[in-house]
Amino acid sequence: MASPAAVVTATFSSSSSIPVSSAGYTASGNTVDLTLAYTPTPGTSLTVIDNTGLGFIQGAFDNLANGATVMLSRNNAVEKESPMVK
């Protein structure tokens, strides 16, 4: 039996929040749960993974396609539409 996917909880409390910092990361087989805990200004970019090493980030989260646009909400109101994966 396959292991269940790991859920990466990515909470953004400011524009400088980076939920995952890793020297090489494999996203394949994992899902990401995005939470917006502040109101960003228009045009703000948010980063889920800070790759601190020389290796590439491998794969994509199972629930977030490469190049996907996501809608993030705070207090039930949409605050940000952001391309999260490039």
Image: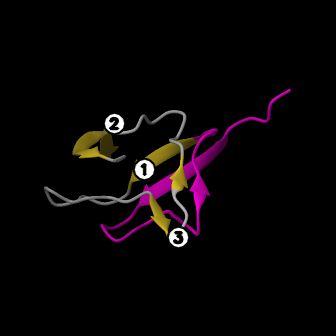
Q: Nearer the viewer, mark 2 or mark 1?
A: 2
Look at the picture and state if 8 lies above or below 19: above
Residue 37 horizontal side relative to residue 23, left or right:
left
Q: Tell me: residue 34, above or below residue 54.
A: above
Q: Is residue 80 left or right of residue 61?
A: left
Badge 3: how crowded within 10 Å, few (<14), some, or many (20+)?
few
Q: Residue 30 at what x, y percent from top left?
A: 61, 42
Q: Are marks 2 and 1 in contact (CB under 8 Å)?
A: no
Horizontal and vertical percent for residue 1?
A: 86, 26
Q: Residue at x 39, y 38 (%)?
A: 66
Q: Which residue type carries mark 3?
A: Leu
Q: Amino acid at mark 1?
A: Thr
Label 3 sits on a secondary structure element that is: loop
Which mark identifies residue 35? 1
Crowd around label 1: few <14 · some 14–19 · many ≥20 (10 Å):
some
Residue 2, compared with residue 7, is above or below; it is above
- According to the picture, the residue beneath numbered tag 2 turns out to be 68
Q: Residue furthest right?
A: 1
On residue 54, which mark appears? 3
Disc 1 secondary structure class: strand
Mark 1 or mark 2, which is nearer the start of the sequence? 1
Q: Residue at x 26, y 59 (%)?
A: 45
* Lower position in the chain sequence, tag 1 or tag 3: 1
* Membership of 2 in magenta stretch: yes
Q: Residue at x 38, y 65 (%)?
A: 13
* Foreground tag (1 vs 3): 3
What's drawn in magenta, residue-wise? 1-30
Confirm whether the magenta stretch covers residue 3. yes
